[in-house]
Image: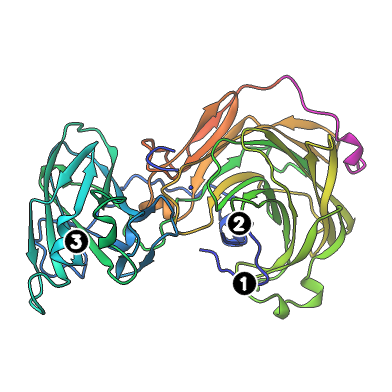
Amino acid sequence: MHTRNANTFVNCSLWSSTASSLGCTRLISRSILAVVAWFASSLGNCSPSSNADDAPKSQLVVPGHTAYVLPDPWGLRVRENQGVSWTSASQSIQWAGLFRQAGILKIQVVAECTKEQAASLELVVLGKALQLVSEQVLNTSGTSSAASKRLLDFGQVELENASPSYVSLQLKLRDSEGQDAGLVSKSQSIQVLELRLDGPGSREAHFNLKERRNAASVHLNYVTEQGAKVDAFYTEVQAIEEPIGTFYMACGWHRGYFGMQVNSKTERRIIFSVWDSGNEATNRDKVADENRVRLVDKGEGVFSGDFGNEGTGGHSHLKYMWKTGSVQRFLVTSESTDDTHTTFSGYWFHPEKNSWMLISAWNAPKEGKTMRGLHSFSENFLGENGHMPRKALFGNSWYRTLDGAWREITTAKFSHDETGKADRLDRTMGIENNSFFLRHGGFLDGFTKYGEPFTRDAGPGRPTDFDALLPKVR
């Protein structure tokens, strides 16, 4: 979903944890301005892989390239249709699926390995370490002890819960720090190609089948008065989980977005970006001068530049190690400078300085309007660590209209991207501590329908410490 280049900026459940990406895409943000009238009521099931020519039709075949690497999501090479290249004994391989039926679950793995390597493996499911029951060579090249494509049978377990529930299946070395450690290395790797499931417990099970293994992006579409002319938008965000590659977007509107990212173990950012006018999707060099947003001002230590590849525009970020669990405060204002231009400004409350600071302000052409389509979202912008849960609270949200009246946002509708429609169903919304929460990834049980509304109680009143930053009432 995101492309890395010089003009793009970075914006447990079963498991827990560098790269950069735009954080939010223009396509996604535009699409969530209105809640589309469809619901994810049809949950996709896995079908046999095209590579599984020797697999019985009754088997559910899950490609190796859909597995996750533990404990380091980037510790092994995973390639589409080639599976996982297992080159380190310190890493293990894990799938997770949504199982809907009780009963016996038979488990097999297809891997290219030696007979000795196969004998050193175990598969952990439901807290049970299943040992290799039998192995069958699927190709006849070389000797029976040489590295060959093998069908590894780990026996079976019984699923007792008939209600939909996520189950993980972890392939590992029995003794990764002892005598088995030398069996897996860069010079002696195991190529994990497929997971094969059979039996009553596998019926109607759901797995993501795509090589990109990010969690779905999830959104809060805020309900405002119809036709509201919004010139200020305030939101507070509290991150509960902090995996690398997470963008908690606080203030989104029809021309931009404002929020906070986890870019690496040592870097986090506060990001504010505004889109150009026009329809150029990739290269800002192709954007006509009259369609470009212009930087008006920026705060101390803030980087500013261009972005492209998913719409184009002006980007800014402040590197700041914001703390998980602490409340971050965001304010966006809009002020028309003439009939066809509007300046959008993003302010963030600096916890250590105990004061508001400008991240940046951009003048947008062909606009001359107030903000609309208010929303927040949470995004997993890396494709390798969707097995880690992401959760944040969004609350105490307010908007001001041109007449100076403030209104509290107490209702939001849930939506998600295309990944959440069929590939990743572990995405939910709810209310916690009188804030909306978004949670996705981690293969946690729970599911929220597209478009479902939630309403929280009104709070004690809006903050007033940013009033000096607001545009004059018109």
Q: Secondary structure at mark 1?
A: loop
Check if residue 119 falls in the magenta segment: no
Q: Tag 2: residue type?
A: Cys
Residue that label 1 marks: 5
Image quadrant occupied by the C terminus: top right
Is 462 in the magenta? yes
State the mark number for residue 117: 3
The residue stretch that appears in magenta: 460-474
Residue 244 position within the rendered picture, expressed as x and y whole percent measured from the top left: 55, 51
Q: Quadrant of residue 16?
A: top left
Is 255 on the left-hand or right-hand side of 455?
A: right
Marks 3/2: CA distance? 43 Å
Query: Disc 3 or 1, which lies upstream in sequence?
Result: 1
Which numbered disc flags the more N-terminal residue, 2 or 1? 1
Mark 1, Cα crowd under 10 Å, few <14 / some 14-19 / many 20+, is few
Q: Which mark is residue 432?
A: none
The Cα atoms of the two marked residues, 3 and 1, are separated by 40 Å
* Three-letter residue code for mark 3: Gln
Q: Which residue does the image show at 51% across and 63% down from the upper left?
A: 1
Q: Position of residue 6 (x, y in %)?
A: 66, 72
Q: Amino acid at mark 1?
A: Asn
**Secondary structure found at label 2:** loop
Q: Is residue 247 above or below residue 453?
A: below
- The residue under label 2 is 24
Q: Nearer the viewer, residue 133 or 407?
A: 133
| Residue 355 visible to the viewer | yes
Q: Report the magenta stretch's main SS.
A: loop
Chosen colour scheme: rainbow
Residue 343 position by quadrant: bottom right
